[in-house]
Image (cartoon, rainbow, N blue to C red):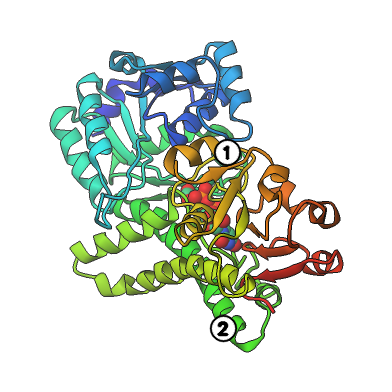
Amino acid sequence: MMAEMDEHPSRWETPTDAVSISVIGCGYLGAVHAAAMAALGHDVVGLDVDAAKIAELAAGQAPFFEPGLTEILAEGARTGQLRFTTDLGSVAAAQVHFICVGTPQRRGENSADLRHVDAAFHQLLPQLKPGDVVVGKSTVPVGTAERLAELLRSVEPTATLVWNPEFLREGHAVKDTLSPDRLVYGVPEGPAGERAVTVLNRVYAKAVANGVPVVVTDYATAQLVKVAANSFLATKISFINAMAELCEVTGGDVVQLADAIGYDARIGRRFLNAGLGFGGGCLPKDIRAFMARAGELGVDQALTFLREVDAINLRRRVRMVDLAREVCEGSIVGRRIAVLGAAFKPDSDDVRDSPALSVAAQMTLQGAEVVVTDPEAIANASAKWPDLVFAETVDEAVQDAELVLLLTEWPEYVALDPHELRTRVARPRMLDGRNALDAARWRAAGWTYRALGRR
Ligand code: UDX
């Protein structure tokens, strides 16, 4: 295997040099990854089958809302280090190929749909050259990397597969990619794996120089790290939301409870915000795919708790609608209700599995006259939920409302002036689905203020 390394020494001999990179799949992960790699000084070509998306990216425009992305796209276009194409042949010049395609939940099932990963891999194989490094970043069921490595070996035995999961959060994706908390490399044993580590350390040279921890491990661990991290985060959120359920029946206050337990450094206060729970394109589908995979592996009992995590999370949405009904004296039929927030979280225009839209849709189905607003996500939300009514501004949304629900804690919503807002609504009643508002301030301004898990 050492011979393999010596066969292609010139391509990797100067450790500080720019690396020639291809990024296959330019969705959320891929577009950010490609732009960030160019920002680090590498030569990058991003590839996607969606010509419209590629045209936007090539013009330096982000196809979705992500702070800081437009700037690094423009910078990459200016320096010429970042190109986007639909032409698969363009990846042939690259030495390191990142697979960044999506792994959505299969329709009607819990498991992950690997169609895009398999397609990307099969398209890449004929383009590979001796010594190339293929890097999987997509979130996949454990066992996928082993299968793909076998396939790679049969086509290009001198190429190496690394599994290098991403942990980026929407809204912080650029920062998370440029300065990650940690880097995880799942590599094969032996010289091929050692060489792949050297290559990835070169790709991430800046982070490595800054002391970012690098965990070098096997394929199985690398794939599991990602789903374990997301499962832990989902569990933490559902844990505090379960405590909210207890607070609701005992008169306790979940925010104070979270503060109090969060002071224990072993527990920590982050990701202990009780409210409407988690949504988005990752946590819900990842915990379900993890349970499905555990079932296939014969260890479904190990992850039975994740079923509860999922159930607690979904119950919060139902509770929110119940609370709206309670505050509206038992019926929401025909009531004008304003919903602030459509994105699954602030600083994102992503509405995948958005708790806010789920609540808005349930209330609409139950006969309420719901108007939804959001600073960034209305276009995506109306495309996905065409039957919902949307307003461009908070003022329009709350006009004559008998109830206002804060469901996504955008900073501009948290900063709303309760006195000013009161002049627009029909009834000053606020349900804070994210425990983001200052209850005393809203009550002092004459509002009926209610929140999940609080008196
Ligand atoms: C998540 C992981 O954080 C990231 O590491 C992984 O790579 C992808 O999945 P993301 O989906 O962008 O990232 O969102 P995140 O910030 O984790 O929030 C997920 C959901 O949890 C949001 O709906 C958010 O509103 C909710 N949440 C978060 C809470 O309800 N309470 C909290 O305390 C924190």
- Mark 2, other Cα within 10 Å: few <14 / some 14–19 / many ≥20: some
Identify the image quadrant of the N terminus.
Answer: top left
Identify the image quadrant of the C terminus.
Answer: bottom right
Q: Residue furthest front?
A: 334
Label 1 to label 2, Cα distance in Å? 43 Å
In the drawing, does residue 292 fall left or right of residue 204? left
Q: Is residue 170 visible?
A: no
Residue plotted at (26% across, 50% down)? 107
Q: Position of residue 141 (x, y in %)?
A: 28, 52
Q: Is residue 371 above or below residue 116?
A: below
Find residue 246 and name its label: 2
Mark 2 C-beta to ligand 1 under 8 Å: no
Q: Position of residue 131 (x, y in %)?
A: 28, 25
In the drawing, does residue 311 fall left or right of residue 207? left
Q: Nearer the viewer, mark 1 or mark 2?
A: 2
Q: Is residue 234 visible?
A: yes
